[in-house]
Amino acid sequence: MKVIYDEAQKKHYPGFFLTSGARAPNPERPERADILFDAARKAGLIHAEPPDFGLAPAASIHTPEYLEFLANIHARWQHIALASDEVIPNIHPDRRDGAYPLSAVGQAGYHMADTSCPIGPQTFAAALRSAHAATHAAHLVAAGTPAAYALCRPPGHHAFRDLAGGFCYLNNSAIAAQRLREGTARVAVLDVDLHHGNGTQGVFYERADVLTVSIHADPVRFYPFFWGHADERGDGAGRGYNLNLPLARKTGDEGFVDALDRALGRIAAFVPGALVVALGLDAFEGDPFGGLSVSTPGFRRIGERIGGIGLPTVIVQEGGYICDALGDNLIAFMDGFRSAHRVPTERSLGSEP
Ligand SMILES: [Zn+2]
């Protein structure tokens, strides 16, 4: 199994972060990628660098005005007298169907959901590289490889079509799902990150061809607060194609695995041709965000269960923050996944490359 990763993803180095109104170091640090990459190698994965796919994969999910904003906003921001080094919003629209401002400050408010996704000089280039990793992993799986791991950093699952948020700029999991859709009629996205995959849900909310399922800390008291509730089931053609499984704070392995079994039951009933796993490791009991209490052996069980459903699978890295066991948790997930993963040949999306 391959780990798809490009060192250039580390050039995004966010500084700003606000937590309960207080300024703190941003926890989505490039060192996360070093830890996860070392762990992937220790788990026996083989490194491959993604090629440059240009803007097309990102444009399959994100609006052109948003991509133009991401590409140009940092340079424009530098022309504002006394502006911060990184682009950080200080005003947000209370509706999205109003006018689109020309001002850099107005556009930052329009395209950034919160203050935890500051944009620096290398942010867009690094986010694009991260999206290339997801795209390449999806290419491999579409070509018949049973599974691939995209070490995406910065992460993506809080990014909507035209909105950054929660350390995320381009929705790597959605980009991978869209790529897989080219080879199969239905794709499922299973998000096991501590936080609800609100961006991914938003991207596919009105579609029946991509099932979105998320297991996460109950947003009634946890980020992202305004999404991830159990009554969000999809809309229009997508009604019934979104499943949210919010868990009480500090839920441990048993409660998480129970929810996972429900999630996998829904996925089996959807009969997808391929699966995207939005793999956050921040549900860990020792993660700095401290929302849930999954143990390191728990990640192995999660990997086993997901591998056991036998679908061609793209694993996309989402959250999981620096703590002693971050690497061990990835190894545990991969060991469990690989021990159980068997893809029947008739399920393959194509022939072996
Ligand atoms: Zn998270």
Image: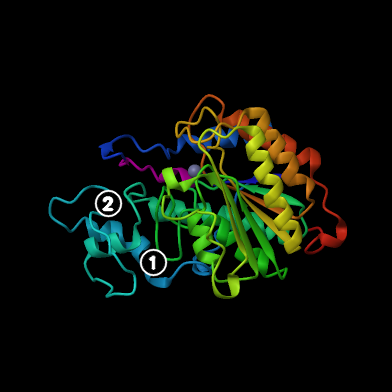
- Which amino acid type is shown beneath numbered disc 1? Tyr
Residue 28 x, y percent position in the rendering: 43, 40
Q: Is residue 289 left or right of residue 21?
A: right
Q: In the rendering, at what x and y percent does residue 43 appear? A: 69, 33
Seen at 50% across and 45% down, the residue is 218
Residue 153 shows which numbered tag? none
Residue closer to the observer: 178 or 75 = 178
Visible residue check, residue 300: yes
Q: Residue at x 59, y 69 (%)?
A: 239
- In the rendered structure, the answer to whether residue 134 lies left or right of residue 42 reads left
**Residue pushed farthest right?**
345
| Type of colouring | rainbow
Instruction: Answer above or below: position of 111 versus 301.
Output: below
Q: Earlier in the sequence, mark 2 or mark 1?
A: 1
Q: Which residue was labeled with disc 1?
A: 66
Q: Which quarter of the image is occupied by the C terminus?
A: bottom right
Point out residue 172 in the picture as x, y percentages from the top left corner.
54, 56
The residue segment tinted magenta is 9-18
Graded by Cα atoms within 10 Å as few (under 14), some (14 to 19) or many (20 or more), the crowding at tag 1 reads many
Q: Residues within 10 Å of mark 2 (few under 14, many from 20)?
A: many
Q: Secondary structure at mark 1?
A: helix
Q: Do the residues bearing badges 2 and 1 touch, measured as CB atoms within 8 Å?
A: no
Q: Please name the amino acid that badge 2 sits on.
A: Ile
Given residues 98 and 44, the one toward you in this image is 98
Q: Is residue 14 above or below residue 237?
A: above
Distance from label 2 to label 1 (Cα)? Answer: 15 Å
Instruction: Determine whether the beta carbon of the residue marked 2 sits less than 8 angstroms from the nearest atom of ligand 1.
Output: no
| Residue 331 appearing in the image | no
Which residue has dot 2 on it? 88
Q: Report the front residue among 59 and 248.
A: 248
Q: Residue at x 27, y 37 (%)?
A: 23
